[in-house]
Image: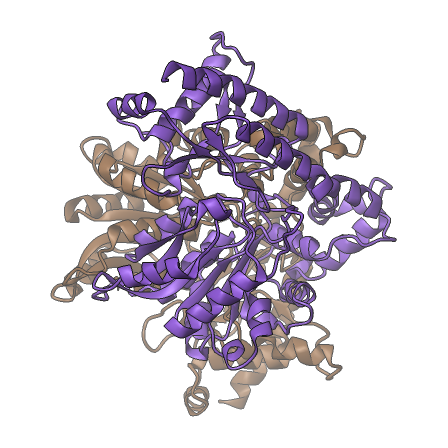
Chain colours: A purple, B brown
Amino acid sequence: MERQWRGKFPVNRRKPAVELGSGVRKSYREVIDVSWGDPHRAGVKPLSFVRQVLAACLYSELMDGDKLMVDVKQRAQRLLGTCAGGSVGSYCATAGIPQTLQSVSQYIMRRDGGVPCHPENIYISPGSQWALTNILKVLVNSEASPRTGVLIPVPCHSTTIISLTTLGAVAVPYYLREERGWALEMEELQRALDSAKGVCNPVALYMINPGNPAGYVQSRKSIQEVIRFAAEKKLFLLADEVFQDCVYGKESEFVSYKRALAEIGAPLSDSVELASFHTASKGLMGECGLRTGYVELVNLDPAVMKHINNLFSTNSCPILGQIALDVMVNPPQPGDPSYPLYLKVRHFYLPASLAQNVRRVEEVINSFPDFSCQPLEGGAFAFPRLFLPPKAIERAKEAGLQPDTFYCLRLLEEAGVLFSPGTEYGQKEGTYHIRFCIMTPSDTMEEILRRLSAFHEQFMKEFS
Amino acid sequence: MERQWRGKFPVNRRKPAVELGSGVRKSYREVIDVSWGDPHRAGVKPLSFVRQVLAACLYSELMDGDKLMVDVKQRAQRLLGTCAGGSVGSYCATAGIPQTLQSVSQYIMRRDGGVPCHPENIYISPGSQWALTNILKVLVNSEASPRTGVLIPVPCHSTTIISLTTLGAVAVPYYLREERGWALEMEELQRALDSAKGVCNPVALYMINPGNPAGYVQSRKSIQEVIRFAAEKKLFLLADEVFQDCVYGKESEFVSYKRALAEIGAPLSDSVELASFHTASKGLMGECGLRTGYVELVNLDPAVMKHINNLFSTNSCPILGQIALDVMVNPPQPGDPSYPLYLKVRHFYLPASLAQNVRRVEEVINSFPDFSCQPLEGGAFAFPRLFLPPKAIERAKEAGLQPDTFYCLRLLEEAGVLFSPGTEYGQKEGTYHIRFCIMTPSDTMEEILRRLSAFHEQFMKEFS
């Protein structure tokens, strides 16, 4: 039986790589897989500081030599001191190592310009998706009639939709306006809420900011509108903010829902219920393999918090992931011996460097008349729209495939580049998209765009 | 709000340590916490080979110097080759890294004298308990009437009971016979099954071998009896075998349920459904902090396997845990440069060394007329019985505590030793027990036994 991969893309995605391995001749030497939000997979180097600290925590003999900088050793020593028995191999409290909870809460306060944050409102979890599922378990009554509804954006990354439907909830879609840079519009939220009447009982509103799959960054004004809407409609806010340190739009700025809520002031700031999710898998760290995220809960009823406490006590987060999280929220500072190297590696993610990929993606895609990419402002993905000719759509349907899945499979087979089809994320009927990770070394991105351009031209000609 | 710890022991368990930290004078300098199955917490050193390989995988610059043995470097290089983009920071297939699944299946075949094992029947998970919960989700119909039942041993570690009841199943207890070394008796299994009539519909039988909390090791004959019973009653077998490499009884041998089933032969070997659980957290590795386990499934219907596949696709196991698992099932061999050091550290866990703790625990506890420990054969715990005087029981009830919880709290307060009370694991009515981890350095165990003896004598005198 075939094993499941994230998403619904057909499993023969591995075919070209397997064929290459068996000596089948192709126009490309290797498959470039940018279908995941996984920078390391795409060739990006990890941040050396976090890797050094983790290595030192695992194998403390490393602290004896001169292989590691003094601040790495100090950091490792401090973090080992937070582990039972001084070992990363021990159990910890299921909500997380207390000192790491403290570090995270201080980070959040700094990020939000001093808005208070309490460690007891934070739960560290094996991945942010796991935390989200736990919060959904509290919100969704699987036996209710009508069923529980959760408003979700379209497009939306697929794991959230899977979590929702597995729990027996109804996903109530609200469409982001692509033509306006994937804007979240209040009339559309209202329309979505109205559409739920007689179908389900909406209790929560889920947003992703910065976007995934679409690379938007919400403005402070938009966030405050959403908060007021949620307050008026008594909706719980689920803010997926895992790309918060990944903003490169010139005019864009990350504003957390927590901060925007505090800035609105009472009574909303004391009453609107909010869960905000973050992770070590995305953005600057890109350490997906560590499986570590956290959720901060705001304004929840103590009885609900108790229930959540129980849910989070069934599994704890890997200690190494928590150590990485601690480093993520406390990176080296100017003057620290590791700072120059840290800055060098981190540089890749900074506007100057990642912005080159972004500019090239927009430039190349928008140079085709039948291809269109909204301005990319944040997150790890581009989600351009494909205007497919009727013949291509027809051919896809003959093959029993969605048109953009058909496009992606042909792209993979003929150009050795692996994207995800828009159909995995939801899209307005009759529109087609592709998603790919833009966090790659710049020469990799050039190669991707070269292959994509040649393929796209050929594909469009074939079906014109 | 207080955060939840594993188990139900009152949260003021941390009080003495906090008081010591605040300068309160006690008869002890530090609290020894052996309430967890967590060797590193109790001062046991990790296996250096696995730590070195993990460190090298995280920070590949370590491979350049001469700090690491050549076989460590080779191992790290091979394992990095199994990670996407050559980084432990990337995502992997949710069932596990294919090469690790292959390694685990080869280990199982060697362990079972060649009984075939297929990687596609194995799922790597963030902890064995997570895997067990997933399998229970498939077995338990939360809406069925009568409810789904699962036979569980008494005593039984508490996380399984929590998982069961959270899913809406009924835990049907079968009592292990303490006087016969915690033997699993067929008449008792039959009695338990009969007791379920009219209450629930038993679909599965859960066993822990080697035992937790009680340190028994089941004989091949006993295992085969259980299998025949399950076959006759059409029960799914859930075999918790996480202490399989942790057997020190002179006459004891670990026999897996999988092997015993194969040895029975057809038709049972082709029909009895079995899930066997293992982990990197226990036994030789003791790497609880990595959150890594696996389950092997035998004789399951393909439709059920598909459902399980979906459940396991919601979360993947940390990559570093998988690397540790790969090392666990492929330890250094004689002739490898790392073998001498590996052997030295591993030595602690071998009969000659751990058996010293075991012998001393049995000796000291059985020297008291009101304290009794069955022969310890395997696992990580002792679970001796306390014969408490009526006055102590009365005093506990006045305090609103179970008598063994009262004993443990007093032990903690007065002697600075943290055990778990038997009431957390279930016990025959009117009997009282304590559980503690015996995987400690031998001087730590001497200190524990010294403090325990002095406290016990005083406590019994006080309430005589």
Q: Is residue A191 above or below residue A357?
A: below
Tell which of A192 and B415 is nearer to you.
Answer: A192
Residue A261 seen in this snapshot: yes
As drawn, is A291 to the left or to the right of A158?
Answer: right
Tell which of A452 and B207 is nearer to you.
Answer: A452
As drawn, is B215 to the left or to the right of A406?
Answer: right
Disc tally is 0
> Picture coordinates of residue B79 (x, y %)?
59, 30
> Picture coordinates of residue B375 (x, y %)?
45, 58
Residue lying furthest front in this view? A369
| Residue at 76% over, 33% down | B61
| Residue at 61% over, 28% down | A445
Tell which of B91 and A207 is nearer to you.
Answer: A207
Residue A123 seen in this snapshot: no
| Residue at 46% over, 62% down | A238
> Picture coordinates of residue B385 (x, y %)?
43, 70
Q: Quadrant of the N terminus of chain A?
A: top left
As drawn, is A290 to the left or to the right of A461?
Answer: right
| Residue at 51% over, 34% down | A436
Residue lying furthest left in this view? B198
> Picture coordinates of residue A157 (x, y %)?
44, 46
